Image (tube, rainbow, N blue to C red):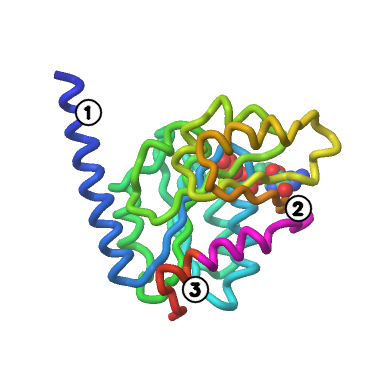
Amino acid sequence: MEIKVIRKILEAGSKVAETNRKILKEKGIISFNFIGAPGSGKTSLLLRIIEALSDKYKIGVIEGDLATTKDAELIHETGVPVVQINTDGGCHLDANLVGKALEELPLDRIDVLIIENVGNLVCPTAFDLGEDYKVGVLSVPEGDDKPEKYPVIVKVSKAIVLNKIDMLPYFRFDKEKFYQPIKRISPNTPVFEVSCETKEGISSFVNWMISKINQKGGEGK
Ligand SMILES: Nc1nc2c(ncn2[C@@H]2O[C@H](COP(=O)(O)OP(=O)(O)OP(=O)(O)O)[C@@H](O)[C@H]2O)c(=O)[nH]1
Ligand SMILES: [Mg+2]
């Protein structure tokens, strides 16, 4: 009985995800869903992307957090439209919440939507929000074993970012160990080594985003 209820909720969620996808498509918006553990650097990466992309594309942001508006405030300071979703303790965003956030954003003036999911390497991977691309954001201090221990993030991500490479000299981090499970699970998924602190590697990741935007025919509003 309980299982039926859960399935019904997931089915409803997937219908709403399709609605979100349709709305985004109609508006010509390309969307990315950033997923990663608390503190992996999702907001820092967003700020670097806004720096690099906002002269060419109009960006919009949805921030997912348990309780605060801290990240949304940082994004707001850049002048980019942002909506905060507070999940009240929930460990992931879902399509219903994102659908409500879309109603609050000026979609006619957005080319690229970036969703920062709630800091969590597991739960958000299971939910279709209607986005085009899930991006896994991992970081050096979390350890080189994360792709092996959390294979689902590798499986669902269309790109993986390894952030905080400026920290490599200070951690025992074996890149071979990090890459091996990725090559096994998703051999074609690109991995971008970046530092949001020094900006190293950021342009490669931004170029990947641009290639995806161009693939879908985003032209800039
Ligand atoms: N050294 C170093 N620190 C970084 C880098 N990127 C982010 N940080 C720091 O890591 C901490 C967490 O970064 P955030 O961008 O807030 O991480 P987040 O993934 O958005 O965190 P949540 O929203 O809480 O899940 C901050 O103190 C950042 O300054 C990096 O490339 N190198
Ligand atoms: Mg954040």
* For residue 101, above or below residue 4: below
Q: Residue at x 55, y 34 (%)?
A: 184
Range drawn in magenta? 197-211
First reached walking from the N terminus: tag 3 or tag 1:
1
The amino acid type, in three-letter code, at marker 1 is Ile
The answer to whether residue 167 is magenta is no
* Main SS class of the magenta portion in the image: helix
**Image mark for residue 6:** 1
- Amino acid type at circle 2 is Glu
Pick whichever, 218 or 99, lies toward us: 218
Please say if 31 is above or below 111.
above
Q: Position of residue 161 (x, y in %)?
A: 61, 47
Identify which residue, 36 or 103, lies in the foreground: 36
Q: Quadrant of the C terminus?
A: bottom left
Mark 3 or mark 2, earlier in chain: 3
Secondary-structure class at tag 3: loop
Q: Position of residue 2 (x, y in %)?
A: 18, 20
Taking the image as shown, residue 62 lies to the left or right of residue 175, namely left
Which numbered circle lies on residue 58?
A: 3
The label number, if any, that marks residue 115 in the structure image: none
Q: Secondary structure at mark 2?
A: loop
Q: Is residue 210 magenta?
A: yes
Q: Is mark 1 within 8 Å of ligand 1?
A: no
Whole-percent x and y of residue 18?
Answer: 25, 53
Instruction: Name the residue at 48% across, 45% down.
Output: 157
Residue at image x 34%, y 52%?
98
Say whether mark 2 is within 8 Å of ligand 1: yes
- Point out residue 24 in the picture as x, y percentages from the top left corner: 33, 64
The residue that disc 2 covers is 197
Residue 113 located left or right of residue 205: left
Secondary structure type for disc 1: helix
